[in-house]
Amino acid sequence: MEKTLQVEGMTCNHCKSAVTNALKELDGVKEVTVNLEKGEASVVYEEGTVNESDMKNAVEDQGYDVK
Amino acid sequence: MEKTLQVEGMTCNHCKSAVTNALKELDGVKEVTVNLEKGEASVVYEEGTVNESDMKNAVEDQGYDVK
């Protein structure tokens, strides 16, 4: 499964790393690609192990808003 | 002694930390205060141990420009 989150507030490569790492730490997340310009984080994940709400929380814990 | 550097490109708190830590790691630097909105880093330091060029290099190594 793949899901793309709209993330607000990422401004630099540190932000990109923070969001990427927070998502990668979730069980069931296989791959994360963050596009800084578009404000998007694409997540490849195993359905049933992790859901969109978990991803949203992980990103928001880093101080960003998910639309 | 105190010196305020004009730093370009700091956008978020991660940037603030990166610049603060890079400056604090220099021998002779006693105190660092970064103002993100103003794009300034104020450094309290021991003259003779560290100079403005060392500070500039430390900040530039983190990917920011010093005016």
Image: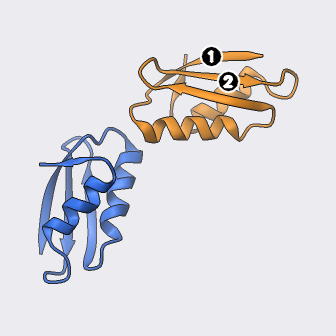
Chain colours: A orange, B blue
Identify the residue under disc 1: A4
Residue under mark 1: which chain is it in? A
- In which image quadrant can residue B17 be found? bottom left
SS category of the residue bearing label 1: strand
**Is B41 rendered above or below residue A28?**
below
SS category of the residue bearing label 2: strand
Going 60% across and 32% down the picture, which residue do you hit?
A59
- Which amino acid type is shown beneath numbered disc 2? Val
Q: In the rendered structure, which disc, 1 or 2, sits on the residue that comes first in sequence?
A: 1
- Counting from the top left corner in percent of width and height, residue A20 is at 59, 35
- In which image quadrant can residue A44 be found? top right
Q: Residues within 10 Å of mark 2 (few under 14, many from 20)?
A: many
Going 43% across and 38% down the picture, which residue do you hit?
A13
Residue B6 is labelled as none
Asked whether the residues under marks 1 and 2 belong to the same chain, the reply is yes
- Counting from the top left corner in percent of width and height, residue B59 is at 27, 56
As drawn, which residue projects farthest toward the right? A48
Q: Is residue A13 left or right of residue A1?
A: left
Q: Residues within 10 Å of mark 1 (few under 14, many from 20)?
A: some
The C terminus of chain A: image quadrant: top right
Q: Is residue B56 left or right of residue A37?
A: left
- Which amino acid type is shown beneath numbered disc 1? Thr
Going 71% across and 41% down the picture, which residue do you hit?
A25
Identify the residue under disc 2: A43
How many numbered marks, from 0 up? 2
- Counting from the top left corner in percent of width and height, residue A64 is at 51, 30
- Counting from the top left corner in percent of width and height, residue A11 is at 39, 31
Front-lying residue, A10 or B66: B66
Residue under mark 2: which chain is it in? A
For the residues bearing labels 1 and 2, Cβ distance under 8 angstroms: yes
